[in-house]
Image: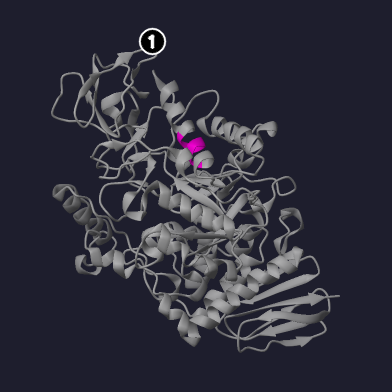
Amino acid sequence: MISVWAPHRDRVRLLGASAVLAMERDERGWWHAEAPVTDYAFLLDDDDANPLPDPRSRWQPNGVHGPTRRYDHSAFTWTDQRWTGRALPGSVLYELHIGTFTPAGTFDAAVERLDHLVDLGIDQVEVMPVNAFDGASGWGYDGVAWGAVHEPYGGPDGFKRFVDACHARGLGVLLDVVYNHLGPSGAYLDRFGPYFAGRNIWGPSLNLDGPDSDEVRRYVLDNALDWLRHYHLDGLRLDAVHALVDRSATHLLEELAAEVDALATGLRRPLSLIAESDLNDPRLITSREAGGYGLTAQWSDDIHHALHVALTGETHGYYADFAAPGALPGTLGSAYFHTGTWSSFRGRTHGRPIDPARTPGHRFVAFLQNHDQIGNRATGDRLAATISPQRQLVGAAILLTSPYTPMIFMGEEWATEAPWQFFASFTDPELAESVRTGRRREFAEHGWAQAEVPDPMDPATRIHSTLPWDELSTPRHRAVLDTYRALIQLRRTHPELSDPRLDRYTITAADSWLLLHRGALRVAANLADTPATIPLDRPPTQLLLSTPNTTPTLTPDTITLPPDTFTILTTT
């Protein structure tokens, strides 16, 4: 049976390879037909010239404008029957983009690099969107066929092979999904029904609370559950949930959390929902029993911003507020910087505080870098282009010994010199030119010459953003990788370093140094360009890890660090 929701159409026909079949409408606006077809499309009303793919397509082998191909999930042979899942608390995450993780840019090529992640100490990979989008390459956030896997990556079977291989190595898999908008090319949902209600800065937004919204909400819920169930995923990262407009008594996110919890119970393994949100609203990660939405965690941009300003000295745009005295220790201690306080970037007060006695740190995903914070810069430059590897390691030590769920962006672990730039490959020449000129116009307003902004439509931009794995053969990059690995190993062997209790997380700070109190362990970090003598509240006993090729000086009540260095030590 092939079915499609088109409640306000007078006629829907099924177009197969050799025949056109009339479909029958039920009382809910769904149209049905029995047809032994492999590839198919829909014809709406009397329009014979524009066959449309299935809004719930599982496979678009010929692109988002072509016909849908039927796909049988049960035909794939899994080998992960003993996989019992991976809980988010205690995990170290690794964000990667399939198209630039390797030169080949496919799931199968990515599998060949998974042992690198295991050796690093990663627990779960967070894969950027793999839903079908127009063109061969792109970030994935312009997807339009939410249930179909991008064919150039390897299609649905390729993604399943990737997940299966991850589970075989003990790696969980989280998938980035986008429900706040659809891309500009191939977004045919509104031709079938009232899926859209207004627009946001990225494109059309979903009708989540207006007439006929029940089926639209079900479309989102079923899509999320299908990824988790049929692709054996361990969780989803929900893109920019602050752009979901829903005035229903039960918000879509709360409804989604309830359904995912029910699925996790049935599957007998944990499933995580991680929101990207700039609301600074603890309700998202507060349990449903306590009146919240019940999501597992959220990204913490505030922690990133505070670390970025401290490491780079950049204070433009939304970084300005984070240049305030005490911004770094304050944000590290409370996850949010804006807690009902003034936000100069927004021109208003913003956020509300968390309760550190009741909200564990593992509910916040923290990072030094991610795809947005790199790729949305004019030239896609990483931290390694601005600061020394030694200084980056200080930031890594703060991150990986914090009570939060740490996430590393691909290549960060060896301080790759490759940029990660914005790129796309829309097939419509007018759309491609619009994106190209719009990108350059945006950064021209901030003082960038057009020639300095990479052309997102140039295939070379994607190539330049691909990880150069040969950098690992150089001592400079290898030393950074070894330190990241050692930090993650310490986090595993010393439970104090992953303790998520924020009410027990104490930070001593002055000028450009920090002392993080982690049980009996202390993490000392000097971000100054001169040596720093840091007072210790307890006598030191053993140095566990320091910046490579540096030696701190210890006394019974102080530690002196060279510039841009860190040390982790035990105390009595």
Q: Please name the predominant secondary structure of the magenta segment in the image.
A: helix
Asked if residue 280 shows in the view, the reply is yes
Report which quarter residue 264 is drawn in: top right
Q: Magenta part of the protein: which range?
A: 223-227
Residue 345 lies left or right of residue 553; in this view the side is left
The extreme right residue here reads 572
Q: Nearer the viewer, residue 229 or 190?
A: 229
* Quadrant showing the C terminus: bottom right
Asked if residue 293 shows in the view, the reply is no
The verdict on residue 71 being magenta is no
| Residue 286 in picture, x, y percent from top left | 65, 39
| Residue 445 in picture, x, y percent from top left | 26, 59
Total numbered circles? 1
Kindly identify the residue that appears in the image at 50 percent across and 79 percent down: 389
Kindly identify the residue that appears in the image at 43 percent across and 53 percent down: 128
| Residue 280 in picture, x, y percent from top left | 55, 45
Question: Residue beneath label 1, please?
Answer: 27
Kindly identify the residue that appears in the image at 62 percent across and 71 percent down: 397
Q: Count neighbours of disc 1 (C-alpha within 10 A) and say few if under 14, some if 14 to 19, many if 20 or more.
A: few
Residue 96 lies left or right of residue 37; in this view the side is right
Q: Is residue 389 above or below residue 452?
A: below
Q: Is residue 563 above or below residue 61?
A: below
Residue 57 lies left or right of residue 452; in this view the side is right
Q: As shown in the figure, which amino acid type bears the numbered disc 1? A: Glu
The extreme top residue here reads 27
| Residue 215 in picture, x, y percent from top left | 42, 23
* Quadrant showing the N terminus: top left
Q: Element under label 1? A: loop
